[in-house]
Image (cartoon, grey):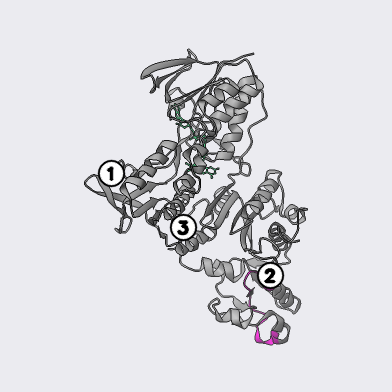
Amino acid sequence: MAPRIVIVGGVAAGMSAATRARRLNERSPITVLERGGYISFANCGLPYYLSGRISGAGNLLLATPEGVRSRYRIDARVRHEVTAIDRAAKRVEGFDHVGDRRFSAPYDKLILATGATPVVPPLPNADAPNVFSLRSMEDMQAIRRWLETDRPRHAVIVGAGFVGLEMAEALVDCGLEVTIVERAAAPLPALDPEMAGYVRDVLDEHDVRLLTGAGLVALHTEQGVVTEVEVDGGERVPADMVILSMGVRPNVALGEAAGLKVGDSGALAVDEYLRTSDPDIYAAGDAAEVVHRVTGQTMHIPLAGPANRLGRLAGEHAATGASARADRVLGTAILRIFDLAMGVTGLTAAAAAKAGIVADVAYVHPNHRAGYYPDTKQIHLKLVYEEATGRLLGAQAVGRAGVDKRLDVIATAIHFGGTVNDLASLDLAYAPQFSSAKDPVHEAGFVAQNQRSGLMPAIHPTNLNGQQLVDVRAPAEFAQGTLEGAVNIPLDELRDRLTELDPARPTVVFCQQGRRGYVAQRVLLQHGFGTVRNLKGGYTLAKRVRRPQC
Ligand code: FAD
């Protein structure tokens, strides 16, 4: 069996498909058609080249047409744009921008790895020469040219998602004053708002202005270039350049025009072997739907990991007629902005609610390694789990060290259907320079276990009306700020001052992070107090969620 394999799109999914196909089938003719000027480039590295952290654009090229020809005998043609699929004749039609002529390529198996395109709003002047998106090497080169030749001072980034935030850091590194405008009430919509709120702090520290609730309304120009960005509410922000990072849309036009099924998510529908509604045409990467591991729903999750892994499987199936089933996806993603890392795996609390899952959450704020070891940093970790069963649904983490490791451990646990009990009992590597004997992952598991078992009933800081509030921190901490109406009884004095409290009133105890609150709660409950709850996430979370986000 030596099917002719044609792949449209030569980056993450496309090149993973091509090289896997070759490793499994030495005889198949394999052709990759890429409309851009490069194959296998590192989109994810583009912001770091712009900032100068990665030197030499060549370092972003993971492969070249010449390289894959000599090593894999793959015919990779750049600047070859596929314009149509003739399913009856089993060939693709296109335009060769190098030779300036039309071409046609027959296939037995076709793989669509056409990726996604940044959203550009249908506004006048969105095509001005100083308005950019960032997806390809060519986009990156255009931004670089503008930075070098026009020496902009003010940049406006539209959209505070992953790419927008990475670009904010890159442009600050280039010496620009940066404003980010975001239509939602909080940045980084992939995280729950209170976790994404840490982004605001780090942006403030680096003098990046973040306007939330500020959708793009207009791009105002002078002499053909944008000079101001107008947002909801009428504010006009000065701009010498604009980066549009408002999300991406899957490139499905080619497949759709050929009659392939497009799913509800807007991406190409595929089966468990990445086959579209035509069994000889596969789709993978940002152009195709994936199945969410937790909800089982089909979704569009445009990330490099799934694109690489699923592209590889599509290549295998196309080349051999068999492969493992397509992975289900958790949407695990991470970002570092300045020195702060933040990421997510699985469902946020908001996503769980949207999926109709009754979920509870646990917050912990432990150190990323032993507190006594030098240069230890704090992690903020939020765990989302199914209330009835303790099944892990998702996690979010923010911190200056150790965030990636905790997200990956929890992602692995979710992958294998783990529960909060599993997290609490994981046998993880420990020495003081790496972790604590009770790792942040364990801590999150313990808190969730205690909440579920009834040992530590807990309450979210947005629900505090009518409660007797007891701040069990030290007076010095209390003096720096507390919740309105709270009395201060430090934990170590609590047993001697019980008469100052009303045991019949529903009571909420809190400390900075939740640990002392838990001990205080146990004391009160065993001294006849009827209803005592520990404040979820302690004062650390409360002051964040009770602060206006905008
Ligand atoms: P793409 O990489 O978009 O490749 C598709 C290719 O198909 C394109 O080169 C396109 O030119 C070509 N094509 C489309 N239509 C045609 C046609 N008709 N004919 C010929 N060729 C065609 N993900 C992460 O997980 N982590 C990160 O840190 C991360 N950072 C990112 C940073 C940036 C700046 C960007 C832009 C993306 C980032 N991503 C990240 C997302 C990740 O890059 C994508 O999910 C991944 O590249 C998708 O791979 P793909 O092969 O499906 O699509």
Residue depicted at 45% across the width and 32% down the height: 251
Q: Is residue 68 above or below residue 341?
A: above
Residue annotated with mark 1 = 125
Q: Specify the segment rendered in magenta.
A: 497-517
Residue annotated with mark 3 = 186
Among the two numbered marks 3 and 2 on one chain, the one whose residue lies closer to the N terminus: 3
> Residue 180 colored magenta?
no
* Amino acid type, callout 1: Asn
Residue annotated with mark 2 = 515
Element carrying mark 2:
helix
Q: Nearer the viewer, mark 1 or mark 2?
A: 1
Element carrying mark 1:
loop
* Amino acid type, callout 3: Ala
> Residue 508 colored magenta?
yes
Q: Is residue 218 visible?
A: yes
Q: How far, Cα to Cα, is label 1 from label 2? A: 54 Å
Among the two numbered marks 1 and 2 on one chain, the one whose residue lies closer to the N terminus: 1
| Disc marking residue 546 | none
Residue situated in front as seen by the camera: 405 or 218: 405
Q: Are marks 3 and 1 in contact (CB under 8 Å)?
A: no
Q: Classify 10 Å Cα crowding around label 3: few (below 14), some (14-19), many (20 and above).
A: many
Task: Give the x, y percent position of residue 50.
Answer: 44, 46
Q: Is residue 157 above or below residue 376?
A: above
Residue situated in front as seen by the camera: 220 or 145: 145
